[in-house]
Image (cartoon, grey):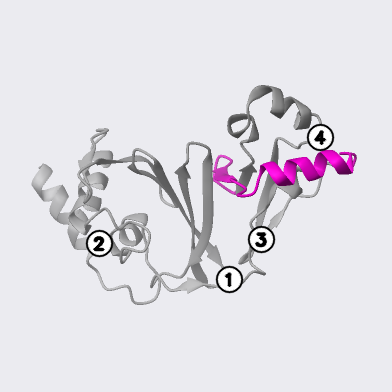
């Protein structure tokens, strides 16, 4: 039975992507390696096979580590590709098109994410108008004193911002700054009262816009 199911998964994933991909398995298996360089097509299909069988099983990746499929449904997928990297994929309809929104997060150890969007042929949409990655300034409330704001900017030369999908249907995105993990406790206390803990984003077609307070 397992071998027949495995063959069915493989057959569906190998279907040519004319028009729009129908399943997350199609997209996961067909990604050319820009997002999943550590996982072969066989690795990915094994992960789907195990997950659909109700098993949480890790598979070896190309660096000799392990990868695990954490969550998957008809439109969403989350993969722990290594001990320090997580990839989330959301498939959504935008007009007549299907768009894949991808969040890649690396633990540094503070989460640091990037967001990209692709069509079903894994051609990337490139436009700053679609989504603007937040910086530390976006988390600062207006009442922060100027001198304290400057100190924060000096401390955060390389801002580390984490992103993740939120909601029952993963319909929103949450950004967090992770300063409580990046700074020592006494230093963080200086800024804590002037910082928003998170910023919410919503989809508007191909664009991803911050939610107004």
Question: Which residue in the protein does label 4 denote?
Answer: 194
How far from the left and from the top, in percent, is residue 151? 77, 41
In the rendered structure, which disc, 2 or 3, sits on the residue that comes first in sequence? 2
The residue under label 2 is: 13
Percent x, y for residue 50?
A: 22, 40
Picture quarter with the N terminus: top left
Q: Nearer the viewer, mark 2 or mark 1?
A: 2
Q: Earlier in the sequence, mark 2 or mark 1?
A: 2
Viewer-nearest residue: 213 or 196: 196
Asked whether 143 falls inside the magenta stretch, the response is yes
| Tags 3 and 1 touching, CB below 8 Å | no
How far, Cα to Cα, is label 2 from label 1?
Answer: 24 Å
Give the structural element (helix, strand or loop) at label 3: loop
Judge whether 89 appears above or below 180 on screen.
below
Magenta stretch?
142-171
Position of residue 2 in the picture relative to residue 197 (left or right): left
Q: Residue at x 20, y 47 (%)?
A: 46
Q: Nearer the viewer, mark 4 or mark 2?
A: 4
Measured from the top left, where is residue 65 in percent x and y? 24, 41
Q: Measure how far apart labels 4 and 2 are at the Cα level.
A: 49 Å
Tell me the SS state at disc 1.
loop
- Labelled pair 4, 2 in contact (Cβ < 8 Å): no
Q: Which residue in the structure is indicated by mark 1?
A: 95
Disc 3: which residue: 132
Q: Please state, as top left, top right, bottom left or bottom right, where the C terminus lies in the image.
A: top right
Report the residue at 25% width, 45% height from top.
47
Q: Quadrant of residue 140?
A: top right
Q: How far is the residue under mark 2 from the one under mark 3? A: 33 Å
* C-alpha separation, residue under disc 3 versus residue under disc 4: 22 Å
Tell me which residue sits at (69%, 45%) in the image: 200
């Amino acid at each position: 039975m397992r071998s027949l199911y495995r063959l069915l998964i493989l057959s569906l994933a190998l279907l040519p992507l004319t028009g729009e991909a129908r399943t997350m398995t199609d997209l996961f298996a067909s990604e050319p390696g820009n997002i999943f360089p550590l996982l072969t097509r066989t690795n990915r299909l094994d992960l789907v096979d195990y997950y659909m069988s109700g098993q949480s099983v890790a598979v070896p990746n190309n660096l000799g580590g392990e990868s695990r499929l954490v969550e998957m449904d008809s439109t969403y997928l989350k993969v722990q590709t290594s001990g320090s990297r997580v990839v989330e994929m959301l498939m959504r309809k935008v007009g007549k098109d299907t768009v894949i929104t991808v969040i890649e997060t690396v633990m540094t150890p503070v989460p640091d994410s990037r967001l990209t969007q692709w069509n079903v042929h894994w051609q990337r949409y490139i436009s700053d108008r679609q989504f603007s990655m937040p910086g530390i300034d976006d988390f600062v409330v207006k009442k922060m004193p100027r001198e304290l704001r400057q100190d924060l900017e000096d401390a955060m030369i390389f801002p580390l911002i984490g992103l993740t999908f939120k909601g029952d249907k993963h319909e929103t995105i949450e950004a967090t700054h992770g300063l409580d993990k990046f700074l020592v406790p006494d230093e963080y206390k200086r800024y804590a009262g002037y910082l928003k803990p998170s910023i919410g984003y919503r989809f508007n077609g191909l664009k991803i816009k911050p939610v107004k307070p």
